[in-house]
Image: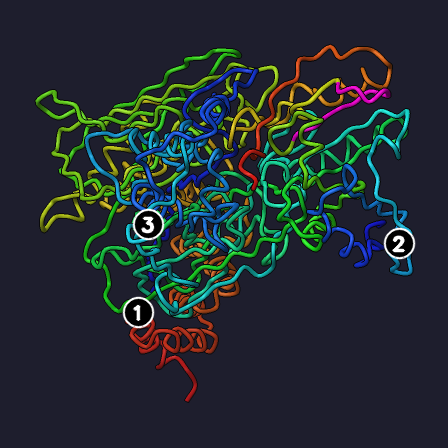
Amino acid sequence: MIVSRIRATSVLTLLAAALALRGAEQRPTTELTVAPVDRVKQSAKSGTGAEPVSRITFNRDLAPIVFHTCAQCHRPGEAGPFSLLTYEDVKSHARQIVSVTQRRFMPPWLPAPSDFAFTDELRLTDQQIAAFREWYETDEAEGDARDLPPLPKFTEGWQLGQPDLILKAAKPHVLAATAGASMLDGGFSDSNGKRPDEYWNFVFRSPVAQTRWVKAVEIRPGNKRLVHHANLLVDRSESVRRQETEPGEGFTGMELQIESETFDPDGHFLFWKPGTIAKAEPRTMALRIDPGNDLVLNTHLQPSGKLEQIQPSVGLYFTDQPPTEFPVLLQLQCDKQLDIPASNKNFEVNDEFTLPVDVELLAIYPHAHYLGKDLLAVARMRNGDEKTLIHIPHWDLNWQAVYRYASPVHLERGTTIVMRYVYDNSSDNSANPNDPPIRVVAGNRASDEMAHLWLQVLAKGGLQEGDARMQLQEALARHHIENDGADFEAHYNLGAILQMRGKTADAAAEYAVAQRLRPGDATVENALGGALLAEGKIPEAIQHLISAALARPDYFDARYNLGLAFAAQQDFVRATTEFRAAVALNPNDANAEANLGGAFAASGQYAQAKLHLERALQINPQHALARENLQQILPELPH
Amino acid sequence: MRLANWTASLLSLLSVAGMAGLPLAEVSQAGRLPQNGDASGKEQSDPWKSSAGKVVVLIFVRTDCPVSNRYAPEIQRISAEHASDVAFWLVYPDKRETFAEIQKHNLEYHYTLPVLRDPQRDLIKRGEVTVTPEAAVFDAKGRLIYHGRIDNWFEDFGRARPAPTTHELEVAIAAAVSGRPATLPSVNAVGCYLSDLP
């Protein structure tokens, strides 16, 4: 009479973004050299008294560049510290513009030109940069008014129109003039505690009351001049909110680890950086959000010199069209190889992963911390040809971003994705969090390092697309295990995939490896217990489920599974206790109510049984087992 | 906070900044402002007259320069630590910045230093500065012994160390206070170019 539906939670880690402050093309060492702009300007202006006349004019030559490339951020209310909308604006920042464009600090665009174009590229050509310089060094002519193109039309407020649901952080986060004591575990722990960046997470608890399909998400960071980037993550298992001391309080931390029950939700990059143009997801790829799901906004903040408050908002745009395509986020990583000796200027790590199915590559997100120097991802085709997917020759955590391809990149089965990252742990790297440099290994803190490459892909498998997705995930998990036999997440994920494919014995074996890597971890103890339960190994299952429940007494899945396990042993007293605990934790779970009713019925307490079976049917009138069990006990009840 | 008494009477004083024949710079010495709103009690001064015989440090800032703004807490710290030996002045060289903007900026960033404007660029020339934020250090005889960056926090635009590893301004202050000649070359600062100002 027991519903044997076993819950096992699979872990998919989504390690959110990170960064701080660093710049452009050249890497001068300690002494600064000023670009020789001033001298040129002075010599041009001295002597004759007449300035050389340039063929460059603002209206004809520069305004189109400024309007297209700069004005999106350099206008009132946006991230740029001053506006660049008029001749006067540009003239009064002329030397600054020449200097920052020559260094390619502005516009901020890290990837070098490669084999595939990205959307919204913000790269100036050498000719454009030279035009600014020539104009500045000569007469800074305004030019013919008829040449001036119209200012672009910028949308005020929500870029995608009024959202269907606006979430606003429960309370503002207060950012000190210089960050300090409040953010020790998320930021640097440098000796004097001064001026590190801050990483803050805002939790939007269970924003929807019914399942919604989200076609677009717009992130408004609150104060664009302070927020260097923001990453929105979906937490389907309330795993992150536990880090808040009080609901709405938020919490510090550079990287987030989110447990996920299924693999589907994490296939979307929901990313904001200054200048991001909000876009809807492709019509076929809406994002599902269920009641009980939390949204978590991971932000990188830079102190401004004065006290600031940041209170971000997120706009959700709904559609009634469920997705028909399900992108997958593939993560390649070389964290295990990261053991960078102090002062090593060229520390290289590599990973290669061969695709088991055809995919369409939609977007790419390289991620390292402050020691990252040169980040490269290449696709090696089966015929040996290589295409550069992305190359960032001067990595700058400050300007990390998700890059979307202008059109999907088709990669055939058998194509190998190659990542090669180079790190600089010397004092020549001004962003080095340690002075003097020390040995650095992988970790979640800003002063640790990372070597991650995320690819958003659509697995191509025709009617068996779901299978193709699973094949991809399985191949990736096995690949990670090959690289690092002690990779907890990989063993866990492989276990979850095998379980979804019905291979419970193999799943239990993988979970067991993961459990040995992290004994007492509530999630893996529960998953292992669940798999053993499905295999009929009840005493072993109970042992692990109890570990899970002890590690986290409010863990619904563990209490529910433990109820099932006791029931399987005909121990209905204990089963009743556990199901009752499960119902208390989640009063709207029809299965828990049905099983509580079932356990009462099995121990002869029919009145109690009826109560809970009816409650299960209230929650879900379609609940077949509850109805069936209710029918069975009716003759036992007093009339 | 001393600035709370920085009254609107100063506005009339600052508004004549562009006129010829003015003294080197105008000053608002926040703590000494008359409470009755009468501007006539206020002196217009040049830092070397009002701080005769002292080491003088001018720090050039702008309200809209992100780099100089991020330095505000550090400028406050350095000036507080050396207040007994050194006369610090905050110089706003952008003549478009109004009194009200400067006052608001001072309040927001908790500046409590006396403020100068420099509409004639006399202080820029005398301090040989090129960007904001930049410091100029003068010894007790009024000789420029250092101009340049405060420290090496910023290596280039947008590229900052987690914390500075050299502290040029404080080294120069120590030299000036002890009467030693400067031992530092003047190091170019990273920030917003003064030559872009109208």
Q: Position of residue A178 (x, y in %)?
A: 67, 39
Does residue A38 belong to the magenta stretch? no
Q: Position of residue A419 (x, y in %)?
A: 29, 25
Which stretch did the figure color magenta? B134-144
Q: Quadrant of the N terminus of chain A?
A: bottom left
Determine which residue is flagged by label 3.
Answer: A262
Q: Nearer the viewer, mark 3 or mark 2?
A: 2
Give above or below for B45 relative to A377: below
- Observer able to see residue A38: yes
CA neighbours of label 3 inside 10 A, class few (<14), some (14 to 19), many (20+): some
Q: Position of residue B181 (x, y in %)?
A: 79, 11
Query: Which amino acid does the dot numbered 2 rest on?
Result: Ser
Query: Which amino acid does the dot numbered 1 rest on?
Result: Leu
CA neighbours of label 2 inside 10 A, class few (<14), some (14 to 19), many (20+): few
The chain ID associated with circle 2 is B
Determine which residue is flagged by label 2.
Answer: B40
Give above or below for B49 relative to B94: above
In the image shown, does A455 or A498 lie closer to the viewer?
A: A455
Q: Position of residue A80 (x, y in %)?
A: 48, 46
For the residues beneath circles 3 and 1, the answer to whether they share a chain is yes
In the image shown, does B188 or A158 lie closer to the viewer?
A: B188
Separation of marks 3 and 1 at Cα, in angstroms: 25 Å
Q: Taking B55 as reference, is A255 left or right?
A: left
Q: Which mark is residue A625?
A: 1
- Observer able to see residue A231: no
Name the element at disc 3.
loop
The chain ID associated with circle 1 is A
